Image (spheres, helix red, strand yellow):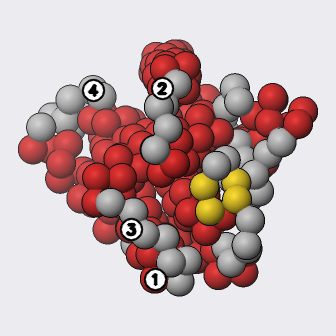
Amino acid sequence: MKGILLLTRAELNRLRRNRRYFIFTLALPVVLYFVIAKQSTKAYGVEFAAYYMVAMASLGAFSGALNGNVIRISEERKVGWIRQLRLTPLPANAYVVAKLLTSMATTIPSVAIVFILGASYGKVNLPIWQWVVIALVVWLASLIFAALAVAIGYRFAPDQAQPITILVYFLFAIFGGIWFPLSGVLQNIGKATPTYEAVKVSTDVIAGLTVPYGLVIGLVVWLALFLGLATLSVRSMAESV
């Protein structure tokens, strides 16, 4: 376990120099919140500023987990970095576990910054327990996309992984109700996405509503699905890395 933690620390140090991470994970959610959050309306039963705080925290978390990992994993597989790690005393799953832990760690700043912005600029006032619960929901939901990043990064070459990642990013952002609240047909479609489920669970908590079990089960199913895909990708590519 010590070796995995050391590898995770090394990953975090490398990520600090990644401009893409800062743009999609930190800068973009903050800019969008400043521009859009101040609206005198409601979304999903809560004030718009509260909804958009959750949405932008989710955007930063899932962007960091997905965009921050796919291309790097694909490139590291291509240049043989994963093969070199397999020659060390590290456990066979050390690389994947370190990537997942790194994603979990890097989502914390994006969630914290957007929540601070929501409380100060958006005037979102919540009991402490609600802040904790919605932070945990967004944080744990990011693990879903960290697993997807492993699945895509292991399976595809960099020139293929990039357009696939962009497509996945936009689909989950739009149909997840992250950039704007959904209604009508779009909402019916979006209900099946993990991004929508994470946002809706959080807004239900803020509104003081009972969270439907279906939303929680949906998040668990998505996590199991993407972890399964990641496992298949790693096993199928084991001989080529």
Location of mark 2 (residue): 216
Mark 1 or mark 2, which is nearer the start of the sequence?
Answer: 1
Foreground mark, 4 or 1, reads: 1
Please tell me the numbered disc located at residue 112: 3
Mark 1 or mark 3, which is nearer the start of the sequence?
Answer: 3
Number of marks: 4
Q: Image check: 12 left or right of 43?
A: left
Location of mark 4 (residue): 92
Three-letter residue code for mark 4: Ala
Cα–Cα gap, marks 4 and 1: 45 Å
Q: Image check: 184 left or right of 113?
A: right
Confirm whether residue 175 shows in the render: yes
In the picture as drawn, the residue positioned furthest to the right comes out as: 185
Cα–Cα gap, marks 3 and 4: 33 Å
Three-letter residue code for mark 2: Val
Three-letter residue code for mark 3: Ala
- Kindly identify the residue that appears in the image at 18 percent across and 48 percent down: 5
Q: Position of residue 98 (x, y in %)?
A: 31, 43
Above or below, 193 relative to 158: above
Q: Residues within 10 Å of mark 4 (few under 14, many from 20)?
A: few
- Kindly identify the residue that appears in the image at 50 percent across and 78 percent down: 123
Mark 3 or mark 2, which is nearer the start of the sequence?
Answer: 3
